Image (spheres, rainbow, N blue to C red):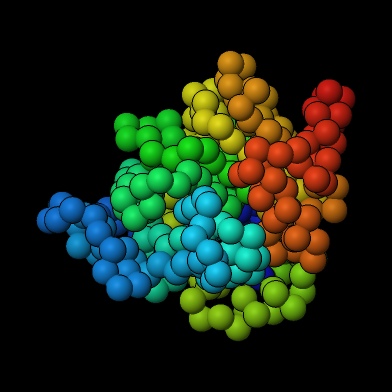
Amino acid sequence: MTGYGAAMGGRPRTGRWSLAGVLLLVCVVAGCAGPRVHPPGPPVQAADFLDNWFVATDGIRLTYRTWAPAEAPPRAVLVALHGFNDYSNFFQAPGKWLADHGIQTYAYDQRGFGDSPDRGLWAGNGAYARDLADFVDLVRRRHPDLPVYVLGESFGGAVAMVAATGERRPNADGMILVAPAVWGRAAMAWYERAALWLAAHTVPWMRLSGQGLNIQPSDNIEMLRDLGRDWRVIKRTRVETIHGLVGMMDAALAAAPAFAERALILYGEKDEIIPGRPTFDMVRRLPAGAQRRQTFALYADGYHMLLRDLKAETVWCDVLAWIDGRTLPSGADGHARAVLAKGS
């Protein structure tokens, strides 16, 4: 488990009233501290690349990785955003495969994750969106004649949606949303919302894990074991950071009616992290005028980590086909249309 379960859809197995009661008692005794956001500092420079770092406008250095074709110049570029508690190495396998097919990928550690400073702390929706816009601009400068696409997995997908509908849209030619994190408060039970509020306002420093929730993010067990051994993958998450994530998911779902990007949206029917109901709700909220520019693909055997499942190459082939303007070879978009027509 990589921390996804506790923070992105894992429902606690403890009693509803006992959890709320304990947290209420703590609130009375300790006072309500409230969740904190750890935003960037003031701008001190223009964003830039330095060796293997993305240097943001406040001077913070964020590690980035790139996978480039070995024998010929790339014909398109991806900017890949990792999921919650993960880091840029999430794209290693698909990045290598896409590089072999002419696509170069850049992926960076978002603030609070991977090698970044303030690891485990939440930087705020605006910070994540601004970093994405700055990073895309730098990639555009490096590859001025190539199409540039943003790929966001889970939390990264939510960041992409919020950025695309915010004050400064990333200068991308399209977006690929892989299991976008849209499981916000509107889709939660009242006791889940209450427990989150109480925890965030009483014990924001407390760290939670997904251990014992029996949630399966992928059928690729060896990959999950590798993540468990990787110290850069956060295993225990601060409550205030979970609170920030849920706020980001709220904002992503709210952004759907204004999300008019050319887009490929990918979702697995076996996803136990982001439930199907808010995902289908998000798809139905997309602007009618953009439907011809947006493709929803649904994978019957797919889990949350579609890009790293045992059948991940099926998804990689669809991503490549979409970039090239071809029909998805898997037919997952036809399956999605059939499921949506049934009202799922």
The residue depicted at 43 percent of the width and 31 percent of the height is: 165
- Note whether residue 73 is visible: yes
Residue 82 or residue 96, whichever sits in front: 96
Would you place residue 322 above or below residue 80 in this image? above
Image location of residue 74, percent across then percent down: 51, 57
Count of numbered circles on the image:
0
The residue depicted at 52 percent of the width and 31 percent of the height is: 261
Q: State the residue lying farthest toward the left.
A: 44
Which quadrant is home to the N terminus?
Answer: bottom right
Would you place residue 265 above or below residue 199 in this image? above
Image location of residue 270, percent across then percent down: 80, 52
Q: Report the side of 37 relative to 92 (left or right).
A: left
The residue depicted at 84 percent of the width and 23 percent of the height is: 341
Would you place residue 138 above or below residue 186 in this image? below
Would you place residue 54 above or below residue 189 in this image? below
- Note whether residue 201 is visible: no
Which quadrant is home to the C terminus?
Answer: top right
Image location of residue 136, percent across then percent down: 38, 48
Image location of residue 277, percent across then percent down: 73, 35
Q: Report the side of 176 relative to 248 (left or right).
A: right
The residue depicted at 79 percent of the width and 66 percent of the height is: 310
Q: State the residue lying farthest toward the front.
A: 72
Residue 78 or residue 303, whichever sits in front: 78
Q: State the residue lying farthest toward the top.
A: 289
